[in-house]
Image (spheres, rainbow, N blue to C red):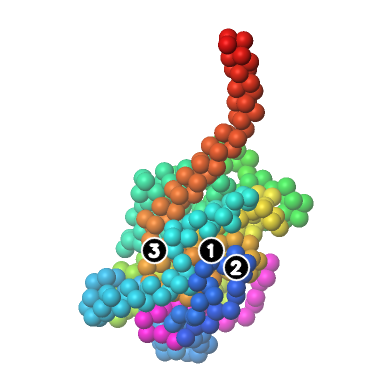
């Protein structure tokens, strides 16, 4: 575990939509690159990282927190109208962005060609991927149709949910057994019993049972931070209680401070409040999600590491015949996209309705397209099963045919 002792208040900014942009660069061209990867780079804007200046209220402005907060979610349609952003321009920008991140639906055949002799392992983020982004985080329900799609796909391929929410909460939202669940950005994984020796020796991993009494492994690499996180949660609740619309969510090994419903004029106050509290906790850091500030332990663990962990648990790491597919929509999912891209192991699919720079290979516009993609995977799997069964029946069929032929011969 990599515990850093100096608080540097890391600021990880989220890429902005690319309307007002700079030229991005793109070098990686992997054997499994989708078409368009070789095409010229598309305009992208990324907010520069700035070091925080210790002091007072100015801190959060100069540190880039506010810039990151503003860029952390696409503007709602109403705002786009108010800003007079012509929708045609948006479509053009999105269209050219898709040359770099082609639609996973339009590229389905290609994905399938690559998956042909491989075993797919599926990783799904929750908010913004399986459920639409809504104002109240407690009401981010997924549709029944999406639940069926997830259930069906999990019957075809090993499937894990990897969410920033607490594991219990995301399980309550999804309500399906037969999947693996990783909460707190992968810091709380309930996965299959692992067989590799290195993993079994891990002190952060304990044997447990799931809701059905099935034996599972529980991996919690940040368990020592639990008292600290609870303490910070209480301070955040107390110190933000006067900020109208602010909401603090306890995600077990991390805390979310939501400002989606806070008037933009008060965002500085939210940021300053979080900043001031974090100053007293050098072993905690801040990341930006979609209109949310996320406080989490400084450990060398993220959604990318969680993917690697789960692949190893499934006995599928370092296997050439495994194709991991990860679908997610926000900055924290980039760690997983990076792992798949850099290891040339599988496909990241970014869910976004606006152009964003990403380590993903493909894109899907919104949760409804995610559902369509999951259903396409199921249909493809079922068709390969049917084909396999048909092929397996061939010797029997030809034997029958032989019997029928000889019967025919006798009858003739
Ligand atoms: O990793 P995820 O499953 O995507 O979780 C990330 C955060 O998602 C939730 O917040 C986001 O969705 C809310 C509901 O749509 C929305 O109101 C909020 O503005 C978004 O940031 C969740 O509440 C957070 O705790 C998660 O960290």
Decide: is 234 above or below 161: below
Q: Residues within 10 Å of mark 2 (few under 14, many from 20)?
A: many
The magenta span reads 1-22
Label 1 CB sits under 8 Å from any ligand 1 atom = no
The answer to whether residue 397 is left or right of residue 254 is right
Q: Residues within 10 Å of mark 3 (few under 14, many from 20)?
A: some
Secondary structure at badge 3 equals loop
Marks 1/2 in contact by CB < 8 Å: the verdict is: yes
Secondary structure at badge 1 equals strand
Question: Which residue is the site of mark 3?
Answer: 365
Q: Which mark is residue 341?
A: 2
Magenta span contains residue 317 = no
Query: Quadrant of the rendered structure where residue 391 is?
Result: top right
The answer to whether residue 368 is left or right of residue 2 is left
Secondary structure at badge 2 equals helix
Question: Which residue is the site of mark 1?
Answer: 348
Query: Quick one: 284 or 299, which is closer to the camera?
Result: 299
Query: Quick one: 301 or 384, which is closer to the camera?
Result: 384
Residue 188 percent location from the top left of the image: 57, 56
Residue furthest to the front in view is 412
Marks 3/1 in contact by CB < 8 Å: the verdict is: no
Decide: is 367 above or below 46: above
Which residue shows up at 50% across the image and 46% down it?
Answer: 380
Decide: is 312 above or below 79: above
Distance CA(mark 3)–CA(mark 1)? 14 Å
Q: Residues within 10 Å of mark 1 (few under 14, many from 20)?
A: many
């Amino acid at each position: 575990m990599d515990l850093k002792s100096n608080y540097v208040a890391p600021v990880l900014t989220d890429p902005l939509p690319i309307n007002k942009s700079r030229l991005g660069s793109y070098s990686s061209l992997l054997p499994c690159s989708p078409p368009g990867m070789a095409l010229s780079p598309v305009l992208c804007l990324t907010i520069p990282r700035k070091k925080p200046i210790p002091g007072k209220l100015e801190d959060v402005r100069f540190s880039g927190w506010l810039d990151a907060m503003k860029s952390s979610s696409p503007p709602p349609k109403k705002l786009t109208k108010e800003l007079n952003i012509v929708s045609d321009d948006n479509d053009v920008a999105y269209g050219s962005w898709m040359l770099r991140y082609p639609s996973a639906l339009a590229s389905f055949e290609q994905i399938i060609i690559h998956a042909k002799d491989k075993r797919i392992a599926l990783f799904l983020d929750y908010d913004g991927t399986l459920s639409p982004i809504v104002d109240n985080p407690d009401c981010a329900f997924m549709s029944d149709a999406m639940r069926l799609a997830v259930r069906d796909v999990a019957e075809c391929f090993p499937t894990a949910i990897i969410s920033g929410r607490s594991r219990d909460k995301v399980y309550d939202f999804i309500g399906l057994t037969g999947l693996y669940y990783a909460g707190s950005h992968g810091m709380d994984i309930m996965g299959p019993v692992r067989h590799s020796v290195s993993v079994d020796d891990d002190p952060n991993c304990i044997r447990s049972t799931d809701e059905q009494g099935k034996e599972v492994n529980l991996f919690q690499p940040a368990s020592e931070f639990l008292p600290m996180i609870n303490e910070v949660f209480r301070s955040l609740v107390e110190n933000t209680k006067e900020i109208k619309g602010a909401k603090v969510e306890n995600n077990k090994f991390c805390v979310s401070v939501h400002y989606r419903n806070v008037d933009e004029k008060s965002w500085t106050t939210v940021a300053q409040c979080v900043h001031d509290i974090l100053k007293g906790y050098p072993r905690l850091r801040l990341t930006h999600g979609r209109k949310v500030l996320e406080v989490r332990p400084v450990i060398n663990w993220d959604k990318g590491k969680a993917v690697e962990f789960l692949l190893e648990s499934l006995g599928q790491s370092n296997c050439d015949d495994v194709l991991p597919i990860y679908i997610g929509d926000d900055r924290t999912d980039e760690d997983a996209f990076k792992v798949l891209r850099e290891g040339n192991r599988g496909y990241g699919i970014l869910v976004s309705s606006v152009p964003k720079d990403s380590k993903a290979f493909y894109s899907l516009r919104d949760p409804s397209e995610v559902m369509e993609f999951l259903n396409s995977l199921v249909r493809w799997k079922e068709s390969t099963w049917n084909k396999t069964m048909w092929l397996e029946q061939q010797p029997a069929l030809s034997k029958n045919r032989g019997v029928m032929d000889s019967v025919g011969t006798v009858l003739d």
